[in-house]
Amino acid sequence: MTQSSNEPWTVTIVVPEDSSLDETGETYDLDVGADETILAAARSAGVWLPADCQQGWCTTCAARLVEGDVAHPNARRYYDEDDEAGYILACTAKPRTDTTVVVDQYDDFLEFRAANDRPPGNSKLDS
Amino acid sequence: MVSLDAMSDDKPHAAGSVSHGDTSERVGMEVIRERGLDPEDLREKLIDAIGAEFTTYYYYTNLRMHLAGEEDYKEITEDARLEDRAHFELVVPRIYELEGSLPNDIRDFADRASCPDAEVPTPMDDSGGFDTSDLEVEDILEVLLEAERCAIRTWSEICDMTRGADPRTYDMAQRILNEEMDHEAWFIELLSKERDDEINPAGHFARGEPGDAPYSTNNRFNDSA
């Protein structure tokens, strides 16, 4: 599907049932511009997703891509294997099509990074 | 003689889940847990946060050196550099109070730092030195600005976590946050003028000695610390 760069994509945010977030079990459809991050759009809409650095480094905002496509043009620490496994960093992820993501995946993502010997996986899990 | 149980009835704060005389647990942690915050989660977050303070202290050393000839910029960067070290040292004792410790391997400490490495924004040359042929002052100022912004986000999150649950850590975090916001204002002013020729005042008065850290080091370390 193609559309003007000014038109927003629909990003569906799924907060899983086992999440500790206040929005647990909820699903939200947000309009997210191509130059807007999923995290910024969510927080602007009142959906308070976890995040720290907002520079694609700390991975607090890790989420799982269920459908669609995103780009991480400004992420400081995002690896090919993250992309191949369907993980995204919501703080720097910008939609490239209508997209569905499951948020609050930090703990699983740390395990994934550790298994791939990528930071901050082992440095966090071995502490 | 009044029994301890009777005293507890009279003074509810003299009782709790930690047994009388037990040194294996800390009331200082249990009171946080009772207020809904996991002190272990907080401790790990604090280690990440001061990992970032420590790495920026290191990286700012290099960034400052490469502001060669820009003495006013170097002075401001020195303030930020030393204050980031002050933030690290302010919170280290809190890590130990929460039954943690610094990672034994400094590589682990840097890997888990909550903010990105703030490297000099230039490639290395063939001999392993910095290739400064295309290095611009504004590029360094931009790295400094974004590092401060990351710190603001991190300490804001810690303020959110601890508000109403852990006044001791909250007090530290909000003091650090004050200084990180100062730093952002400094680098907005400098970058605006250097890159865009725009006047965007920080609106601050001068610090005292370099690295004064007026909010975060109200209790000065003695010379032997």
Image (tube, grey):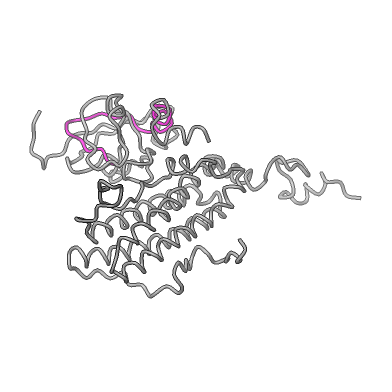
The part of the chain drawn in magenta is: A92-113
Residue drawn at point x = 50 percent, y = 62 percent: B216
Residue drawn at point x = 57 percent, y = 66 percent: B220
Image position, residue A10 (x, y; %):
20, 34
Q: Is residue A89 above or below residue B14?
A: above
- Is residue A49 one of those drawn in magenta? no
Residue B47 falls left or right of residue A45: right
Residue drawn at point x = 72 percent, y = 48 percent: B12
Q: Is residue A96 above or below residue B143?
A: above
Residue B222 falls left or right of residue B160: right
Q: Quadrant of the C terminus of chain B?
A: bottom right
Q: Residue furthest front?
A: B127
Image position, residue B73 (x, y; %):
31, 67
Image position, residue A113 (x, y; %):
39, 30
Residue drawn at point x = 49 percent, y = 32 percent: A125
Please tell me in which quadrant of the rendered image residue B33 appears: top right
B117 and A51: which one is in front?
Answer: B117
A115 and B14: which one is in front?
Answer: A115
Image position, residue A1 (x, y; %):
10, 28
Q: Is residue A97 above or below residue B50?
A: above
Please tell me in which quadrant of the rendered image residue A108 appears: top left
A71 and B129: which one is in front?
Answer: B129
- Is residue A94 one of those drawn in magenta? yes
